[in-house]
Amino acid sequence: MTPDRWERIKSIYHDALEMNSTEQSSYLDHACSGDSDLRREVDSLIAANNNAGDFIISTALKDAAKIMVADAPQSIIGRKVGNYQVVSLLGSGGMGDVYLAKDLKLGREVAIKTVPPAFAEDSERLRRLENEARAAASLNHPNIATLYSVEETDGLLFITMEHIDGQPMRELITPGGLHLDAFLNWFTQLADALMHAHEKGVIHRDIKPSNILITQSGVPKILDFGLARINRSEVEGLKAVETMSLTGEGVILGTPAYMSPEQAEGKEVDHRSDIFSFGVLMYEALTGRKPFLGDSYAAMISSILKESPVSVAELRSGLPSMLVRLIKRCLSKSRQHRYQTMREVRTVLEEVKAEYEANPPDISYSSLFKNFRTTRGRPRYLIPAIVTCALLLAAAAAGWMGRSWFNTRDAVPVSMVVNTPPGVQPFFTEALLSPDGRMIAFSGIQHEVRQIYLRPIDNFEAQPVSGTEGGREPFFSPDSQWLAFFLEDGSLKKVPVTGGPALTVSDPFPTFGSADWGEGDVIVSTGSSGLFTVSAGNDKPRQLTKLDLSRKERLHRYPKVLPGGKQVLFTIVGETNAQAAVASLSDGSVRILEDLGSASYTRYLQSGHVVFARGKELMVAPFDLGGLKLKGNPVPILSGVYFMANLHFSTNGTLLYLPDTVMNNNTVMWVDRSGHATPVLSRAGNYRSPKISPDGRRFAVQLGNDIWVYEFVTGRGLRLTFDGENQGPIWSPDGKTIAYSSNRNGFWGLYTVIVDQSAAPQLLLTRDQRIIPYAWNPRDSLLTVMYSMSATNTDIGFLKPGDTTPAPFLNSPFIEDTPRISNDGRWMVYFSNETGVVEVYVVSYPDGKEKVPISRGGGMYPVWSQNGTEVFYRRNTRVYSVPVETKGAFIAGTPRVLFEGRYLTGFDVSPDGSRFLMIKNDAGTLPSELHVIVNWAAGIDRWIANTKKSSRK
């Protein structure tokens, strides 16, 4: 094997290691260019590396090199090279082999990196190498691998540098990302190192995880400073690299996934290119995935140049907002919009680190859930065994099945995941834990039948409970022997947990929601106008609390009867926040717990604490139950909680809650009328609300918090919004304008933007509450909008050009939503809960005199066919079609199921009605798993005490 051949193999191999399997295949096809022997050599190295597993630190190339290097003239193992005794091969890079050697003059270990003979034979190349190395050698920083010299002995050209005994960061980044304290520790140092280099005029140009080593003592070191410029272009030749350039005008230097846009275009780079790459590195280190994806080299470059990555906050909850903004700005396409110096980046990281250290999370809980996230990458068949063993150990250690809360204080918390049962669409927002901690109950749908499911906590099978057909919002009796639930008509039933005939508890509730069964057989339920209560002894429900509309209260939710059975703790949901409150069960008087601040799902623990959700965190504080006031400040104890936390505690200290869900794996799909789906875009993302343009050539969609327009044929995307949360795009009849809702200025407003971006977005109106456009009438150019009117309803109205408030069309005490106007402008379809069941209706427009029900047994999110002969709507996972006659009197036919699938609710129909533009997400729109922590109560007092100590430092 010739030296050039060996260098070529190594270079391709190292590039391929930075890519996923799909990207690798495309890249190798291109890089090997039909050379089957070359492809076979590289494939064998990659396979060896993949088979090495997590227990082998050294890469496959190191072992392969030991075999192949015997045939290569540059092998120097065992030789004395100048003043260095070569000991062993450490590894290989894109430029050359790296050896461990002993500096015989200074008595220290060094790393020797060989340089291909082509450099020594070309004076210009050699001069550039020496200049780059000289600049890098001027760097003196504890987080930069020191470059000592460029030397030539007996025709061998090599570089000597500091030997670092460490592990590449690439091998340390887990699927869930680095722990935040490790991230901040390492990246603050790395930012300081890059700042030092930039201020010395040295740019790295190839920042990536494999160029960062973490020493045995935990110190990060940046490798290959000053060498990136010559690594690929000089080793492979300019021509080879230029064939990979998108523009053909310059040379692309750097690893594709970590390139800045200017690098990707082959332009001249400055220190701000390193800032972009550093942003990519931070993104991957925190999330375990790269921000820019592509199934080929060209697709990767296109993604860097055109796509906006999903926010790290969407991929990982609980991150400091300052850190999220830092990464977003580092990843700006324009150099002018990034941070201009690494000094600025370092300053922000130091501020985040200082704040984090002043308010540290509970290490035991944080590490527990860090491991929780990483188990998702394990084979699914391993998880039950792992969790079973953990639960058995926990039960043996704490005896949690038969012991009280206070006897488990020294037990170790053990976590488990409850996944979706096969074939069941669960409603985990209704899940709860039995008071004795032995069972989990939730409602779910299987084969169009909704009922209650029960899962013993020490078993992995959830079974339907006989007698609960049609049941929803389940809750347990205080002794855990009965399971109560509501039917759709508000009837309250109960069955033994072992199953059996359903017994009627009381007359129907006018409205119902989450409920609790407390001491003395008192039951309290959420209602649309306040809390309702009833005795389990079969009597009529009575209203306990009423919404205080002067305080803009929207709902009273999540009731929990307090010990003693005389008061109920609940959440007041307002327009802008949520508060904890206590109501007397005798007279309904309400006391708001002002000292808790913003709080939802507030629960009182027998340990004398309250726990509640605030944002995506669980907070805990000592609480005086008699005085109904805090005895200390709330502190965060757990992060990564879904906004509907659904907290439940057992009397023995077990916690159930909903984890935050990340909607970053959505895929835009065409789905035909038989349910066959094909992808529209290759890249997954947090897509929502697709709308097809009138000419059928493009579609608008919400991606993250922004509105984008994509072409169907080319897949090219254009971002229309850049600030705030933007949603609900709709097209104007001529296809030139998009209307959407945004809070870009701190309040909700209705905007329009010209798709070619020839003018700035235009603000039409503002509101304190959300307003969403749904249709743009082709006949009179009126915008049809849905807007929140009061505490318990949304209404539908129209907006004329120049109006600053919508004119009401459908306004009632109920919900009216997703209005769509037929193409002839004579009919509006929408859904409403006016009967207590959400159904689809058509109403005549604009007089509103004629109304026809469309769905039967429930339906939502209706859409017209373009020719006006069909209405499509969703019901759970099914898509229905209803034939309609719109000429003269409106006539609706019988709904029929077209297909079934797990798609997000919003969808649109192609102009010819043959297929549907839908958003696919196998995880669904709600969390698809529950988190349970046995012995969660252990250590609460200790955690609060540690937090107080930290705050006094």
Image (cartoon, helix red, strand yellow):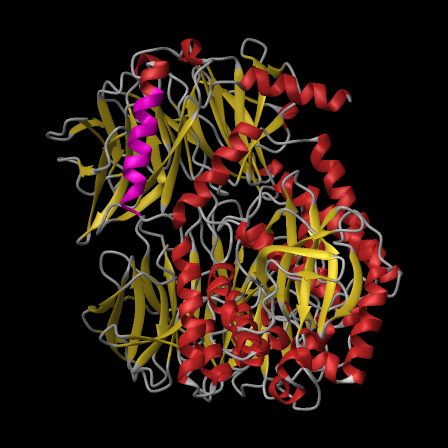
**Front residue (pair 780, 218):** 218
Specify whether 772 is left or right of 442: right
Residue 67 falls inside the magenta stretch: no
Quick one: which residue is furthest to the left in this view? 501
Specify whether 80 is left or right of 458: right
- Quarter of the picture containing the C terminus is top right
* In the rendered image, the vertical position of residue 78 relative to residue 334, given as above or below: above
Give the prevailing secondary structure in the magenta stretch.
Answer: helix
Is residue 542 among what the camera can see? Answer: no
Residue for point 37% across, 21% down:
650
Q: Position of residue 632 (x, y in %)?
A: 65, 17
**Front residue (pair 683, 628):** 683
User: What number of labels is visible?
Assistant: 0
Q: Position of residue 394 (x, y in %)?
A: 36, 21
Specify whether 271 is left or right of 2: right
Residue 388 falls inside the magenta stretch: yes
**Front residue (pair 584, 615):** 615
Q: Which residues are magenta?
A: 380-394
Q: Position of residue 294 (x, y in %)?
A: 50, 73
- Classify residue 4 by image quadrant: bottom right
Residue for point 55% across, 68% down:
14
**Front residue (pair 916, 178):** 178
* In the rendered image, the vertical position of residue 408 relative to residue 347, given as above or below: above
